[in-house]
């Protein structure tokens, strides 16, 4: 599908806002988790792990869609995030769900989500300026 620069910007903004919302949800829902074992020791913890994994899948898929819409031009403008790795988490969780390591998911949540959120919010600020084109 062909997009105009204006359409790409609007669609990209919508995708970025969905990603922002998903990251915030993960952070809020896991605020009581302090270690990977907190996921594994209770059914409530397992529910939080399941929910976080689902949202990580959504984030990865949304980033893939964002990359398509922006013709792979937006994400490379921020080199502080390993975008292919972030998108790859989606594939790992989706295709190897029963082998998910709670330690790895906790590492992503506790160490990687805040920088990702900052990058997403930076893109939102940039794309919110009507003069910005992609």
Image (cartoon, grey):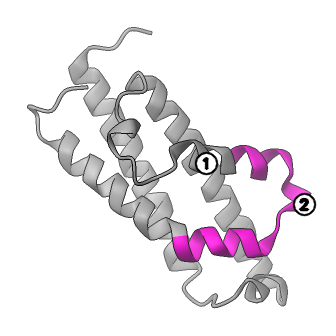
User: Which of the labelled discs sits on residue 105, or is there none?
Assistant: none
**Which residue position holds label 1?**
85
- Find the residue positioned furthest to the front: 79
Q: Residue at x 34, y 62 (%)?
A: 118
Badge 1, how many Cα within 10 Å: few under 14, some, many 20+? few
Looking at this view, is 20 or 116 the one in front?
116
Which quadrant holds residue 55? Answer: bottom right
User: x and y percent of residue 131 in the render?
Assistant: 8, 31
User: x and y percent of residue 84 in the render?
Assistant: 57, 42
- Find the residue positioned furthest to the left: 131
User: x and y percent of residue 114 in the render?
Assistant: 43, 69
Looking at this view, is 54 or 36 the one in front?
36
The overriding secondary structure of the stretch rendered in magenta is helix
The residues bearing labels 1 and 2 have C-alpha atoms spaced at a distance of: 18 Å
Q: Residue at x 85, y 55 (%)?
A: 97
Give the quarter of the figure containing the C terminus. Answer: top left
**Which residue position holds label 2?**
99
Q: Residue at x 38, y 46 (%)?
A: 16
Please tell me which of labels 1 and 2 falls first in the chain: 1
Q: Nearer the viewer, mark 1 or mark 2?
A: 1
User: x and y percent of residue 103 in the render?
Assistant: 75, 75
* Residue 103 highlighted magenta (yes or no): yes
Looking at this view, is 133 or 82 the one in front?
82
Left or right of 23 in this view: 119: left
State the SS at label 2.
helix
Give the quarter of the figure containing the N terminus. Answer: top left
- Find the residue positioned furthest to the right: 98
Instruction: Look at the image and give the residue range highlighted in magenta.
Output: 90-111
State the SS at label 1.
helix
């Amino acid at each position: 599908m062909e997009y105009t620069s204006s359409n790409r910007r609007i669609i990209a903004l919508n995708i970025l806002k969905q990603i922002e919302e998903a990251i915030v949800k993960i952070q809020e829902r896991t605020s009581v988790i302090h270690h990977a074992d907190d996921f594994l020791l209770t059914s409530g913890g397992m529910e939080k792990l399941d929910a976080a994994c689902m949202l990580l899948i959504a984030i990865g898929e949304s980033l893939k869609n964002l990359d398509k819409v922006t013709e792979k031009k937006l994400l490379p403008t921020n080199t502080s995030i390993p975008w292919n790795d972030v998108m790859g988490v989606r594939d790992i969780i989706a295709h190897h769900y029963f082998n998910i390591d709670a330690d790895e998911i906790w590492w992503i949540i506790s160490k990687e989500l805040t920088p990702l959120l900052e990058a997403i919010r930076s893109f939102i600020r940039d794309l919110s300026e009507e003069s910005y084109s992609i």
